Image (cartoon, grey):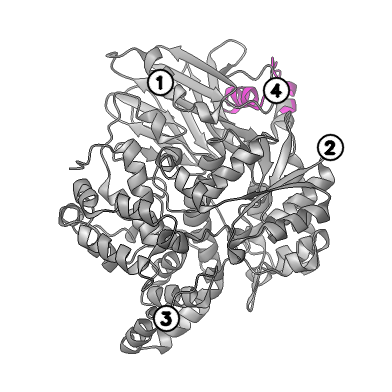
Amino acid sequence: MCGIAGFLRTAAEFDPRRVLQRMTDSLRHRGPDDEGTHIDGAAALGVRRLAVIDIANGHQPIANHDGTIHGVLNGEIYNFLELRRRLQRRGHVFRTRSDTEVIVHGYEEWGEDCVRDLDGMFALAIWDSVRRRLLLARDRMGEKPLYYHAGPDAFVFGSEVRALLHHPAVSRALDLSALSRYFLFECVPAPHSIFADIKKLAPGHTLVVSPGAKPVMDRYWAMEFARDDSPDEDEWCHRLRTTLERSVKNRLVSDVPVGVLVSGGVDSGAVTALAARSSARPLLTFSVGFEEPSYDERPFARRVSEHCGAEHEAILFTPRDARALLERVGALLDEPLVDASFLPRYVLAQAARQWVTVVLSGDGGDELFCGYPTFLADRPARWCRQLMPTPIHSVVNAAVQRLPSSARYGSADALLKQFFRALPYGPEVRTQLLLGGLTPAEQTQLFSPGVRAVLGSFDPYEELTRAIDESSFQEVTERLIYHHSKYYLGDQTLVATDRATMAAGLEVRAPLLDHALVELTGRIPNHYKVRGRVTKVLFKRAVADLLPAHIVARRKQGLGVPVAAWLRGPLRGVLEERLAPARVARRGLFEPATVSRLLDEHVAGHRNHRKILWALLMFDAWCDHYLVDPRWT
């Protein structure tokens, strides 16, 4: 795992080595073990390396045999040994055992098509000095990040925003449409970033750039659904189990110790059980929890670990830990993100890094196999839309919103309030509001008059609706899987995981995101994913023999954080300080009166505004590190 950065320049008004050094230095946390650079005229490649494969000889950038092609990689290629053998049969000679060298030789043999054969999580850059061409590529599901700036004076790229901001051609101009998207999606979805001059390379895409030429983007992979009714349920179980076993085994390949992040749910539990069976070393597992019982999954995680014969470390995350991190969280995130689980993820990663360098996770199972309550909410939402006239909905919604707020995780009142709040909207927007985010009216009230004037008629929902409409998926379940995978998993969960773990120098591998497994799930009929009120039907059956029955039967919980109670109690002082009217007014982005009303209602216990208040808190913390100047026009 590494951090990569570089650029192509058309102007020579700065020292390229000094700029490249600053860019890679900003990524030291992603790669504490080694660093390397390559400069060839207008092209510059840099890397910070976390040594996992071929520790002694895997120095980057890596070149082909005659030094005409250089490459850098952030991530891991799990089938690199197979590709290496294929290339050796075609006459390629290797100097190292690293996967990065395999990519370089693969490019030499197959050109840009080399990425189609890569099985892994990756963001990579290859400089071809003969063709004067730079190739960027990102993995299929978006496990590894890659940002870029395509300007008239330079093309700049890097693993995180912070690296690009060290290049003189990249400005810190805030993109107000991206800010609007942040409050809709609780993140800034690809291909956008919070800065106007910076974009994200979308998952499953390549980008080819030559000095002075317009970048050429190509999609080499996309999620597809091609339902296959020929196998019966037993056969699908066998295929799923076999594919998952192979994926876990591939992700255990490492020259450093490997552990598992376990939550106590069926996804990470299945990964733990299969890893324990395949690992050549005693398996270590790690979990994080809270003092509040309804949020605390540590007892379940320990039960899974004991059942699998693993050694377990459980971490307690407290309000004191959260308060200590709030001054640093903006810098750690790199880009605004609402997901409150980032904080305990980071503390968990720090603890795990004391024992291992690589961990496996259960990310992806709920998105691919319909594990979230939002999958179950879609059908009743459609019924209510048909049967409940707007006036009646307004009355019912007003009554529901006045229900007392429970402090328990996943309480009925919280689910009902979210459901009826989202009900008036079309299916795509409704699903997003069930996942989180503000309605158009709420955004209008939140933003300052100046921001509203700049945004004008901008509709942050239009791109979401168009993306799902253009996906050509016909069945509702397929559209929901795509929505959750693209906007929730790819732009939120994987981002939180990557930033939290890489800030601690820890590599995370997600066996459930193996592209062969993802493609397999696209062929499985939907009634094997959701059946009535039962979610993840086939997956649970395929792994049932690996885990205790009560773990398989548990309802979905997730890494929830008791933010609502903390903002009324131990974090109240920080909240009131950061969202004080004078401070909000100085930023010029939000309406101070609206923010004060939200804060007062929440602290008094009249309403639960934890999501919007946490979003404002994270944005303010991010501004301290990236947007110090309050001017944005």
Lower position in the chain sequence, tag 1 or tag 4: 1
**Residue 336 versus residue 207 in the image, above or below:** below
Query: Disc 1 to disc 4, how far (Cα)?
Result: 26 Å
Magenta span includes 47: no
Packing grade of label 4 (10 A; few <14, some 14-19, many >=20) is some
Q: Which residue is mark 2?
A: 280
Q: Earlier in the sequence, mark 2 or mark 1?
A: 1
- Quarter of the view holding residue 356: top right
Which residue is under mark 3? Answer: 403
Q: From mark 4 to mark 2, how far is it between C-alphas?
A: 18 Å
Is 96 colored magenta in this rendering? Answer: yes
Residue 150, image x, y percentages: 33, 32
- Badge 4 is on which residue? 54
Q: Earlier in the sequence, mark 3 or mark 4?
A: 4
Q: Secondary structure at mark 1?
A: helix
**Part of the protein shown in magenta:** 85-111
Q: Nearer the viewer, residue 493 or 627?
A: 627
Q: Main secondary structure of the magenta part?
A: helix
Of circles 1 and 4, which is in front? 1
**Looking at the image, residue 320 lies above or below residue 418:** above
The image position of residue 400, as x and y in percent, is 40, 82
- Looking at the image, do the residues carrying marks 2 and 1 touch, with CB atoms under 8 Å apart? no
